[in-house]
C-alpha cells in the first residue's frame, strides 16, 4: 500500500501533464470536427459579426488577465464565435504547443487551456486588430504556456478560427509589470496577436508578452511545419504508467523474499538458529548417537567387565 502511494506521488506530475495534454488534444479534435460540419455561410456570417464586434470595441485600456477583478465577459461577447465551446485554436509549432482557446480569462477557463482577454480584439485578424491570448505556466497538473518562454523572434504561430488559418511571426518579446498593459493595445493599420503568461515560472511577479505580426499573401513564405494536424497533437505513450506499475511490483517482490523461511537443510546445519532446536549433546565415554543409539542409552564403558583375577601358578 505504501509503495503504491509513493509511486502515485512520484509520478503524479507526469500523469497529470499527460492527461491534460490528452484532454487538450481531444478538445482541438472536437473543435476541428465541429467546424468542418458547419455550413460555409454560417462560418462566413460568424466571422463577419466578429469583425464588426472588433470595430465597436473601446480602445482606452485593458486589464491584467490574471487580476481577480478583470473585466467580466458580457452576453454580446459570449455570443461571438460560439458555434462550439472552443473559440479558436492556437498552435506554436517551434515549441510543440497546440491548444484550444476559450472565452474569457477566469480561473476555470485558464485551468482548461488558453483564454481570450475580454476587451481585446477577437482572434479573427484584420487591420487594427490586436487579440490577446493568455495561459498559465508552471502548473503541476497541466502544461499550457510553459513553452512560451522558449519562443524566439522570428518564430511563427497560427490561429485557426472557423476554418481560417491566420499566421503570425514573432516580432516582439517583452517582460513587463502586471499593470503595464499599454503594449496590448492595437496599432492602427496593423494586425497583431500577443501571447501572455506569468514569469518567472513559480514566482509569477511579471508578465511575458510574445507578440506576433500577421504575415500573409506572397510575403508569407511557405513553412511545412505550420501544417496543423486535424486531430490535434497526441501526448504519446504514457511511459510514466510503467513506473506506477513497476515500483509497487518490485517492492512486493522484495518483501516476499524477505519473509520466506530459510531452507530446512540450512537451518539444521546451523544448529537451529532459525527456531529449530539443536540436537542434544551426549556426555559419557561413548562417541554420541553414532555409536550409542537413542538418547538415554548407557555409554560403552558401562558394558565393559572387570578383568578376572588369575591365580598364581605353582611350579
Image (tube, rainbow, N blue to C red):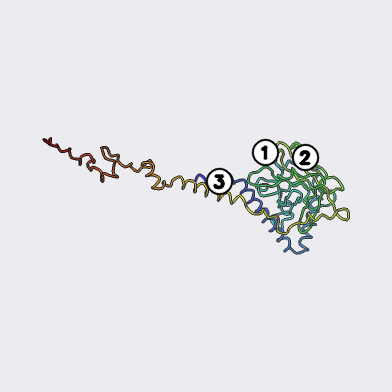
Quadrant (top left, top right, bottom left, bottom right) of the C terminus: top left
Q: Nearer the viewer, residue 60 or 197?
A: 197
Q: Nearer the viewer, mark 3 or mark 1?
A: 3
Q: Nearer the viewer, mark 2 or mark 3?
A: 3
Task: Using the numbered discs, state the Cα–Cα distance from disc 2 to disc 1 in whole angstroms.
Answer: 21 Å
How packed mark 2 is, by other alpha carbons closer than 10 Å (few <14, some 14-19, many 20 or more), is some
Q: Nearer the viewer, mark 2 or mark 1?
A: 1
Tell me the SS state at disc 1: loop
Q: Nearer the viewer, residue 253 or 23?
A: 253
Tell which circle, 3 or 1, labels the residue nearer the N-terminal end: 3
Tell which circle, 2 or 1, labels the residue nearer the N-terminal end: 2
Label disc, if present, on residue 181 of the rendered structure: 2
Label disc, if present, on residue 7 of the rendered structure: 3
Point 27% across, 37% down: residue: 283
Q: Position of residue 294 (x, y in %)?
A: 25, 45
- Where is 219 relative to 146, above or below? below
User: Is residue 75 at all visible to an observer of this figure?
Assistant: no
Point 74% across, 39% down: residue: 207
Question: Which residue is situated farthest in the right direction here?
Answer: 218
Residue that carries the numbered disc 1 in the rendered image: 202
Question: Which residue is situated farthest in the left direction here?
Answer: 314
Q: Answer yes or no: do the residues labelled 2 and 1 have beta carbons within 8 Å?
A: no
Tell me the SS state at disc 2: loop
Tell which circle, 2 or 3, labels the residue nearer the N-terminal end: 3
Amino acid at each position: 500500500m505504501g509503495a503504491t502511494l509513493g509511486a502515485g506521488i512520484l509520478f503524479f506530475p507526469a500523469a497529470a501533464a499527460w492527461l491534460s495534454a490528452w484532454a487538450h488534444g481531444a478538445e482541438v479534435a472536437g473543435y476541428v470536427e465541429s467546424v468542418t460540419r458547419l455550413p460555409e455561410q454560417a462560418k462566413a456570417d460568424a466571422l463577419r459579426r466578429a469583425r464588426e464586434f472588433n470595430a465597436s470595441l473601446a480602445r482606452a485600456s485593458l486589464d491584467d488577465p490574471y487580476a481577480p477583478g478583470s473585466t467580466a465577459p458580457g452576453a454580446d461577447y459570449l455570443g461571438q464565435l460560439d458555434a462550439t465551446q472552443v473559440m479558436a485554436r492556437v498552435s506554436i509549432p517551434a515549441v510543440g504547443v497546440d491548444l484550444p482557446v476559450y472565452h474569457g480569462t477566469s480561473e476555470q477557463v485558464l485551468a482548461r487551456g488558453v483564454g481570450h482577454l475580454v476587451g481585446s480584439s477577437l482572434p479573427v485578424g484584420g487591420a487594427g486588430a490586436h487579440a490577446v491570448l493568455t495561459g498559465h505556466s508552471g502548473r503541476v497538473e497541466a502544461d499550457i504556456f510553459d513553452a512560451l518562454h522558449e519562443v524566439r523572434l522570428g518564430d511563427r504561430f497560427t490561429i485557426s478560427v472557423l476554418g481560417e488559418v491566420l499566421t503570425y511571426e514573432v516580432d516582439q518579446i517583452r517582460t513587463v509589470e502586471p499593470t503595464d498593459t499599454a503594449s496590448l493595445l492595437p496599432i492602427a493599420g496593423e494586425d497583431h496577436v500577443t501571447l501572455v503568461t506569468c514569469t518567472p515560472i513559480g514566482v509569477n511577479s511579471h508578465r511575458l508578452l510574445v507578440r506576433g505580426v500577421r504575415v500573409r499573401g506572397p510575403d508569407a513564405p511557405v513553412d511545412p511545419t505550420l501544417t496543423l494536424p486535424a486531430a490535434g497533437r497526441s501526448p504519446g505513450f504514457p511511459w510514466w504508467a510503467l513506473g506506477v506499475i513497476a515500483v509497487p511490483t518490485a517492492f512486493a517482490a522484495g518483501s516476499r523474499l524477505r519473509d520466506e523461511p530459510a531452507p530446512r537443510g540450512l537451518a539444521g546445519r546451523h544448529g537451529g538458529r532459525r527456531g529449530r532446536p539443536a540436537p542434544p549433546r551426549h556426555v559419557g565415554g561413548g562417541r554420541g548417537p553414532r555409536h550409542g543409539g537413542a538418547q538415554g542409552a548407557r555409554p560403552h564403558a558401562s558394558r565393559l567387565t572387570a578383568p578376572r583375577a588369575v591365580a598364581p601358578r605353582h611350579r
